[in-house]
Amino acid sequence: MKKVTCTAPVNIAVIKYWGKQNEELILPINSSLSVTLHQDQLKTTTSAAASREFTEDRIWLNGKEENISHPRLQSCLREIRRLARKRRNEEGDENVSRILNDKVHICSVNNFPTAAGLASSAAGYACLVYTLAKLYGVEGELSEIARQGSGSACRSMYGGFVQWVMGERDDGKDSLAKQVEPESHWPELRVLILVATAEKKHVGSTAGMQTSVETSPLLKLRADLVVPERMEAMIESIRKKDFKAFGELTMKDSNQFHATCLDTYPPIFYLNSVSQRVISVVHQYNTYYGQTKVAYSFDAGPNAVIFMLEPTVNEFVEVVKHCFPPESNGDTYLKGLPVGSAVLSEGL
Ligand code: ADP
Ligand code: DP6
Ligand code: CO
C-alpha cells in the first residue's frame, strides 16, 4: 500500500468570485484575488492510500463517508489519473503503472467549521488534488484541476496573494491561479478570524451563485464594470503595501458581494447580526483613529476575516474581546497570524 498525507490552507478572497459561465468546468464570470491564510489557523489535512486490497474508490470527510461519485470528486480523480497515465506512457514508470490499477481510499479533515463560509471547499479540494498528485507522482499546473473541484480551491494552491485569472478559452485551460506576491512580500500584514457561528450555511456557495447569475442584474454589472478596474487597484495596493487602499477595496468588495446576494431573487442572507456588529465595530475603530487601520471581509457565511498591520493586533483583539464575549470566538482564531507561508506540505 502507498499512502500520502498533505495539508492545505484556506484562502479568503478580497476580490470575490461569485458566478460561473461554465458550471461543469467551473469557469467564473470574473477574475478574483485572495490572501492565503497561515496554516496554523485554518487547514485541511488529507490522506490518500492506494492498495491492491481496495475494491472501490472511497472518501471520508471529517470522519463520515461521503459519496465518491460526486461529479467534482470524479473530475479531480479523473484528471490526476489522466496525468499519471500520461507520465507512465512517457517515462514508463513502473510504480505509477501499479498504482493506476489500484483503487484509492481518501480521508480528509478540516480543523475548522465545514460549509460555514470559511472556504472549506477551497482548502478541501486544493488538498485533495495535491495529495492525489503526490500519490500518483504527478507534477505541473494543478490549479486547473483544483478549480474543477471548487472554483476558490485553485487559489489555495499558492501562498501569499493569489489571483484566479478568469481566462478566455472555452476549455478553461487558461483559467488558472497565479501568485501576485509571495507571503514574504508583506510580513506586517495580519489576519484574524472571528467565528460568529460554526453552523453549516443554508445556501451552499454553488447553489447560491447559480441563483445570483440567473436573477441578479447587479452581479452582471459588478463582473463587467467594477471588478476589472478594482482588480488593477487591488494588485497595486498589494505591490505598494498600501494598507489604506487594500483595506478599503477589501471592505467595498465584500459589501458589494453581499449586496449581490441581496439582489438575488429570492434573496440570500449570509451575514447575521454578529457580522453586522463586526462591521460597525471596524468602522467605529477606523473613525476613532481617522484612518483605515482594520478591514473586514465576509465570504458566503457570517464569519469575519479581519485584516490589519501587526502594531494594531493587540489593541484590536482587546476591542473584539470586549465587544464579543469569549464563547463566540475561541483563542485559536484570535492569533493575528501573518499571511500563509509554505502552502502545501507533505509527509506528516
Ligand atoms: P465553504 O464556504 O466552507 O467553502 P461551500 O458551500 O463552498 O462552503 O462548500 C462546502 C462543501 O465543500 C462541503 O459540503 C463539501 O462537499 C466540500 N468540502 C469541504 N471540505 C472538504 C474536504 N476537506 N474535502 C473535500 N471536500 C470538502
Ligand atoms: C464567496 O469556490 O465555494 O467564497 O466553485 O461552486 O465550489 P464553487 O464555489 P466556491 O465559492 C466561493 C465564493 C466566495 C468568494 C471567493 O472565494 O472568491
Ligand atoms: Co466554498
Image: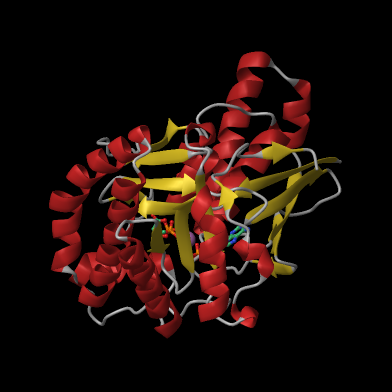
Q: Residue at x 22, y 79 (%)?
A: 265
Q: Residue at x 60, y 39 (%)?
A: 343
Judged from this view, the residue extending furthest toward the top is 91
Between 16 and 327, the one lying in front of the other is: 327
Percent x, y of residue 147: 45, 46
Task: Pick the residue in front: 288 or 5.
Answer: 288
| Quarter occupied by residue 101 | top right
**Residue 175, above or below 8:** above
Q: Is residue 77 left or right of residue 319?
A: right
Q: Is residue 19 visible?
A: no
**Residue 31 in the image, given as x and y percentages of width and height:** 30, 45
Quadrant where the C terminus sits is top right
Residue 25 position (above or below residue 265): above
Q: Position of residue 55 (x, y in %)?
A: 79, 53
Q: Is residue 65 above or below residue 265?
A: above
Which residue occupies 71% across, 51% down?
46
Quarter of the rendering occupied by the N terminus: top right
**Spot occupied by residue 32 in the image (x, y as percentages of width and height):** 33, 47
Q: Residue at x 72, y 37 (%)?
A: 135
